[in-house]
Image (tube, rainbow, N blue to C red):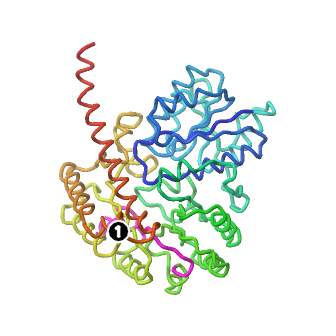
């Protein structure tokens, strides 16, 4: 069976890194006996992407639909591929596809692999190749007689060490590295989250039970990354410190083997409880930690069901910075009912406690508390507003937007931050500053293009 796996167009993305999830699916498809190709269309135009997909003959085409702002591309691909390749099997997966499968199944796709996909996808491929029915396969969603049928969920993978070990030899990543300006990859050490934050969809996708790889498996992945000349590894776990003891153990292994590879991770603000863990992180060459601060207002933290306090986030950031680890604070504004004073308090907190910060506006992401209340579900034009600070809840939308844009302008005009991004520091730390300018530029450019399209559309309609 000839299989094509596609990373679709995304109008804006945080960083240019190879898709860890699709690489996993590529490897399990190989294990199932398929001939597999992987196509990264992240920075291609839609027309370029469609041409490249249709340039080959494939029995199955799988397109990842992870982000809501990539859903319009995925939906259009489904319709266009179905018209040009009516016999091909179209499959999707990822966060958006899992949580809103109707967006894909009503636009040309045959199946959606829901949630954690490695086992389901491999069983799906083997069933197709052997001629067996996939109708009752766990973890699969499909159209049956025009109705969406969602099969029982797949059991979570308890032993993450059974996932394919990626040595990167199957993939040509040089184009991605050149675009990023750094040989930068993602890694995972665990899956799942024990919390259930109001704005987050993690537990819907990965479960509310935390599972982790063994320290020895994590060390082996670091060995491979070092051998392949990788400059920086970012651990994509929702909270890499949820099992602090496991984190400590694999850090010790990395230290003892003198890996020396710079890496980063994301953590919650109350996961690290032992002060000596910060010393281990520094010795293991952790150079960046993203901290889920979200808000500097106890009332809003409670609304979001966050487990930490403002003082707790302050202590965590101070402990990291004292060890020379860059802290990137993640904040959210735009909670319905949030006051101007509360917005400014969050900005002030991030500016005082972190080296870098990423502020987002609260969006009604699929699976979150806010999705069901959002009136534009299923509208691709509304989906395309995601990821660019254009979907704003609550009544103070204009004020929230203006405060957000003003704060971003002041942030990026800071001479010290600009110098660190372009003029000084080692290449990894320089990249960690510079990437924020790249993302900001892409967001502004895409917003301008979207605005221009909106102005042109009425004129085009009027002329027909």
The quarter in which the C terminus is drawn is top left
Which residue appears at 23% of the width and 21% of the height?
459
Q: Is residue 302 visible?
A: no
Quarter occupied by residue 454: top left
- Count of labels in the image: 1
Residue 78 vs 254, above or below: the answer is: above
Relative to 301, is 61 on the left or the right? Answer: right
The quarter in which the N terminus is drawn is top right
User: Which residue of the protein is positioned furthest toward the bottom in this rendering?
Assistant: 276
User: Which residue of the protein is positioned furthest toward the front in this rendering?
Assistant: 423
| Horizontal and vertical percent position of residue 30 | 74, 44
Q: Is residue 27 visible?
A: yes
Q: Secondary structure at mark 1?
A: helix
Which residue appears at 32% of the width and 75% of the height?
353
Residue 272 vs 423, above or below: the answer is: below
Relative to 312, is 127 on the left or the right? Answer: right
Which residue appears at 45% of the width and 75% of the height?
270
User: Which residue of the protein is positioned furthest toward the right in this rendering?
Assistant: 130
**Can residue 298 be found in the magenta stretch?**
yes
- Pointer 1 residue: 420
| Horizontal and vertical percent position of residue 199 | 40, 56
Which residue is at the front of the view, 240 or 258?
258
Relative to 269, is 149 on the left or the right? Answer: right
Residue 202 vs 113, above or below: the answer is: below
Which residue is at the front of the view, 47 or 104?
47
Which residue is at the front of the view, 149 or 409?
409
**Can residue 188 be found in the magenta stretch?**
no
Quarter occupied by residue 192: bottom right
Give the extent of the magenta segment: 282-307
């Amino acid at each position: 069976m000839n299989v094509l796996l596609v990373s679709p167009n995304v109008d804006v993305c945080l960083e240019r890194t190879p898709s860890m999830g699709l690489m996993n699916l590529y490897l399990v498809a190989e294990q199932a006996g398929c001939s597999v190709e992987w196509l990264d269309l992240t920075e291609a135009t839609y027309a370029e992407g469609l041409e490249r997909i249709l340039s080959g003959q494939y029995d199955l085409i799988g397109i990842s639909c992870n982000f809501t702002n990539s859903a319009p591309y995925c939906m259009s691909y489904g319709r266009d591929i179905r018209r040009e390749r009516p016999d091909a099997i179209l499959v999707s997966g990822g966060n958006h596809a899992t949580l809103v499968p109707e967006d894909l199944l009503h636009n040309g796709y045959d199946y959606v692999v829901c949630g954690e996909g490695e086992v389901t996808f491999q069983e799906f491929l083997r069933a197709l190749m052997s001629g067996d029915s996939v109708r009752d396969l766990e973890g699969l969603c499909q159209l049956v007689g025009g109705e969406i049928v969602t099969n029982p969920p797949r059991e979570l993978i308890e032993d993450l060490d059974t996932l394919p070990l990626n040595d990167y030899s199957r993939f040509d990543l040089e184009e991605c590295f050149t675009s990023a300006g750094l040989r930068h990859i993602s890694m995972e050490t665990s899956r799942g989250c024990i919390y259930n934050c109001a704005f987050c969809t993690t537990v819907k996708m990965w479960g509310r039970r935390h599972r982790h790889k063994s320290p020895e498996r994590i060390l082996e992945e670091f060995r491979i990354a070092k051998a392949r000349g990788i400059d920086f590894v970012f651990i994509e776990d929702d909270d890499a410190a949820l099992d602090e003891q496991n984190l400590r153990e694999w850090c010790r292994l990395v230290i003892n083997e003198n890996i020396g590879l710079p890496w980063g991770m994301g953590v919650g603000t109350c996961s690290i409880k032992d002060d000596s863990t910060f010393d281990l992180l520094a010795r293991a060459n952790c150079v960046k930690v993203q901290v889920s601060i979200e808000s500097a207002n106890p009332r809003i933290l409670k609304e979001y069901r966050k487990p930490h306090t403002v003082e707790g986030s302050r202590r965590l950031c101070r402990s990291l910075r004292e060890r020379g680890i860059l802290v990137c604070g993640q904040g959210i504004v735009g909670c319905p009912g949030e006051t101007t004073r509360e917005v400014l308090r969050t900005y002030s907190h991030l500016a005082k406690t972190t080296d870098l910060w990423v502020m987002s506006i609260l969006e009604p992401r699929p699976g979150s508390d806010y999705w069901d209340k959002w009136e534009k579900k299923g509208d691709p034009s509304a989906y395309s507003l995601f990821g660019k600070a254009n979907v704003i809840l609550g009544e103070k939308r204009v004020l929230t937007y203006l405060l957000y844009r003003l704060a971003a302008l002041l942030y990026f005009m800071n001479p010290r931050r600009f110098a660190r991004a372009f003029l000084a520091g080692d290449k990894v730390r320089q990249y960690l500053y510079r990437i924020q300018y790249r993302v900001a530029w892409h967001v502004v450019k895409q917003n301008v293009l979207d605005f221009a399209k909106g102005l042109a559309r009425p004129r085009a309609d009027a002329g027909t």
